[in-house]
Image: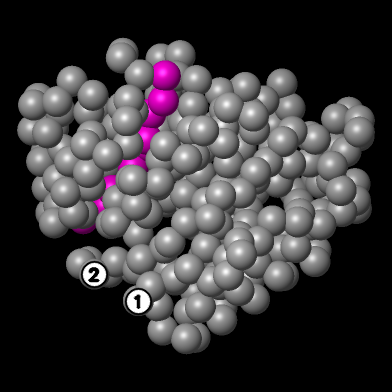
Amino acid sequence: MKSKAVAVVPTYNERDNIKSVVDCLLSSSGDVDVLVVDDNSPDGTGKFADELAKKHAEVNVLHRKKKDGLGRAYCDGFSWALERSYEFMLEMDGDFSHDPKDIPKFLEAAQEADLVIGSRYRDGIRVINWPLNRLVLSLCAAKYVQIITGMPFTDPTGGFKCFRRSALEIIDLDRVRSNGYSFQIELTHQVWRRGLKVSEVPIIFTDRFQGSSKMSPAIIREALVIVWQLWFRNGFRRKPSTNSGSILTWGFADDRK
């Protein structure tokens, strides 16, 4: 292992994008390794990623047997990274929605934060190629999460993040079951409610030009419900707990270590 940081990139039918994403990661993100987490893509993304790994020592591939949700893919990727002593774990999409050139500013911010969130809405709206209804849905979701959970972040559903190792070590990743938007909300909440430092950096989000979105009504419904469960789990508080022992576990498996 050469780097202290690894970018975890889940894939499912991303063969058209993965080479360009990996090339851009290696050329523009500094000293960062890459982990492709492939859910047995029918289009051969996993096999293609294996070929990239043979050419680049910084590239690794984790094969999962089936499509099992974005959240589980990230959790498996984080577990892989924790076993290999990386200090910083980034999560990002494999379709160029997230720009690898932004990674250095994430790592800079992570020197003084436990979690860094890439925000599409900090100091203005920075979204390209989204229809108005999708943008409104995202903005309303962010406000919904803020009101119910108390988390003050402008983009709690965003999927471009950098976790410090110590932040992920307090979470039992095997017991995280949420996916999609709700996964992003839950992991941010688990870090925030323990009083750890969470920072936001502005990013430009560009919706995919190739392939299809993984958004679905089920993902939206899950996100609507989970914020209430998180509020309950935090003892009906809308601020970080000063006593981790008072965190409730109803509706979730206990993630405390």
Is 159 displayed left or right of 235 in the figure? Answer: left
Crowding near pointer 2: few (<14 within 10 Å), some, many (20+)? few
Q: Which residue has dot 2 on it?
A: 209
Question: What is the x, y in percent for residue 100?
Answer: 33, 45
Mark 1 or mark 2, earlier in chain: 1
Question: What is the x, y in percent for residue 108?
Answer: 51, 33
Q: Amino acid at mark 1?
A: Asn
Quarter holding the N terminus is: top left
Is 244 displayed left or right of 58 in the figure? Answer: right
**Residue visible at 23% across and 34% down?**
26
Q: From the image, give the main secondary structure of the stretch colored magenta.
A: strand
Residue range of the region highlighted in magenta in the rendering: 4-13
Front residue of 13 and 144: 144
Question: What is the x, y in percent for residue 162?
Answer: 51, 38
Is 56 displayed left or right of 242 in the figure? Answer: left
Front residue of 22 and 145: 22
Quarter holding the C terminus is: top right
Q: Is residue 8 magenta?
A: yes
- The circle on residue 74 is none
Cα–Cα gap, marks 1 and 2? 8 Å
**Residue visible at 41% across and 84% down?**
131
> Would you say the residues marked 1 and 2 are in contact, meaning their CB atoms lie under 8 Å apart?
yes
Residue at the extreme bottom of the image, as rendered = 132
Question: What is the x, y in percent for residue 132?
Answer: 47, 86
Q: Amino acid at mark 2?
A: Phe
**Residue visible at 69% across and 56% down?**
153
- The circle on residue 129 is 1
**Residue visible at 18% across and 20% down?**
57
Front residue of 108 and 221: 108
